[in-house]
Amino acid sequence: MYKKTDLNNGLTVVTNYMPNMESMAIGIWIRTGSRNEDEKNSGISHFLEHMLFKGTSSRNCRKLKEEIEGRGGSLNGFTSEEVSCFLAKVSFKHTDIALEILSDMVLNASIDDKELERERGVIIEEIKMYQDLPNHYVHDILTDIMWPGNSLGFSVAGSIDSVSAILRKDIVGYKNINYIPQNITVVLCGNVDHGAIESRLKKTFIGTVKRKTKPISEFCNNQSEPRIKIMSKDTKQAHLCIGLHSFGRSHKDRYALSLLHVILGGNMSSRLFENIREKKGLAYEIGADVKRYNETGAFVVHAGTEHKKVKEAIICILKELRETKEKNVTVGELKRAKEFFKVQLLMALEDTLEHMLWLGDYSTSLNKLPDRKEIIKKLDAVTANDIRRVSNSIFKSSGLNIAVIGELTDKEQKEIEKELVL
């Protein structure tokens, strides 16, 4: 049973009462991420996330972890384009101390100078690590060409140059602007008493005032022709990403897009997996993702293949996309996709942590609680015509973006460019 309360200072409290669960999942969500940055301070949200784990005015780094892990729990955090989240999973018996630890981190992080310099080096090594992983880095190349001139095109971790230039005063200033009650949602899933949590948080987040935060720079898509970027690198395998602009997370066609994703690349019975891997043997790893942001989004296909087979792989992937535009998916495909989506959702919601992440993402991004029955109802209402219509609205040559890491000659690149037709 979901409950939601907005406190007078703007803080939002969301709980899901799951009385038979031993575990309790807690998340403190902040509506700020890499979209709130500019080129100069790119990576500051992620940097701040790291610093919250380095100690508070009353607990050092080790003490923070021991308070949770010494009770059998886990402590973690993440930063994305639009949110930052600090989370713990513990026994419900330890709810109070886990909530205290997370609140202490968010409110009282010391951001010590020595710790900051040490962590700066850690983050730079993290950036280098991902740059050495072509199957990861190719996604950064894709976002750079898909969202030029917009913060969506930045890496969430920032660049080595931007992270090297961020000062303590920058991080403290950024935190003071964005880590305020009106920007925060606290979510708990498990054997939880909503009233008790509400009373506790009123005392914890006391004495703060509302203030205006810097609005994000909304993306306006003016792409008119295909874009391709190839990074020449000596790798054992070529890695490619194909990205097309889609719509925001609250768009009326979001359910049709979800089913299109399942049918094309959401599992091992998808068209891309079956036709590109199983029948043609062009790739070991191939799949699709849907990225959802406030006002925009992306449909992304990713794969790894032999260097000499990049062109063939791209042609075959584009052929699969075109076919969803030209004719309706089959009755069987649509039925299986709906069942896959529904059952995956329901099984995930049996876990307190997965449920907390779902609730937190929903309430933070859309400022409302999800309704499972309504979601399933809208999903069931999607028709083959809806999926074909969405395919035609998204899969366009003018909005096609391709990123490749591998060993390709100029001739091969030009040959690929001739095939960019949807």
Image (spheres, rainbow, N blue to C red):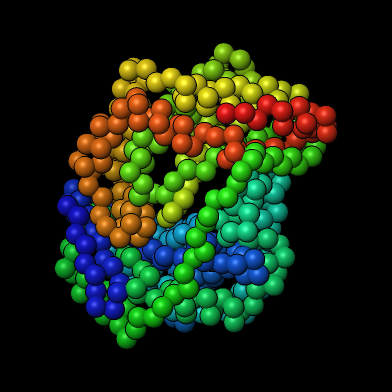
Residue found at the very far top of the displayed protein: 279
Task: Please tell me whether residue 159 is drawn above or below residue 311 in the rendered image.
Answer: below
Q: Is residue 49 visible?
A: no
The residue sitting at the right extreme is: 410
Instruction: Give 373 or 70, whichever is nearer the viewer.
Output: 373
Image vertical order of residue 375 relative to residue 408, above or below = below
| In the displayed structure image, the side of residue 39 where residue 230 appears, left or right | right
Residue 233: x %, y % from top left: 79, 39
Q: Where is residue 231 drawn, in percent x and y? A: 76, 42
**160 on left or right of 222:** right
Does residue 165 appear left or right of residue 248 in this picture?
right
Q: Residue at x 18, y 64 (%)?
A: 194
Q: Does residue 2 appear anywhere in the picture? A: yes
149 in relation to 47, above or below:
above
Which quadrant: the C terminus? top right
The residue sitting at 47% across, 43% down in the picture is: 246
Residue 115: % across, % down: 61, 74
Front residue of this view, candidates 225 and 62: 225
Image-based side of 175 in relation to 205, left or right: right
Would you identify the image quadrant in which residue 403 lies?
A: top right
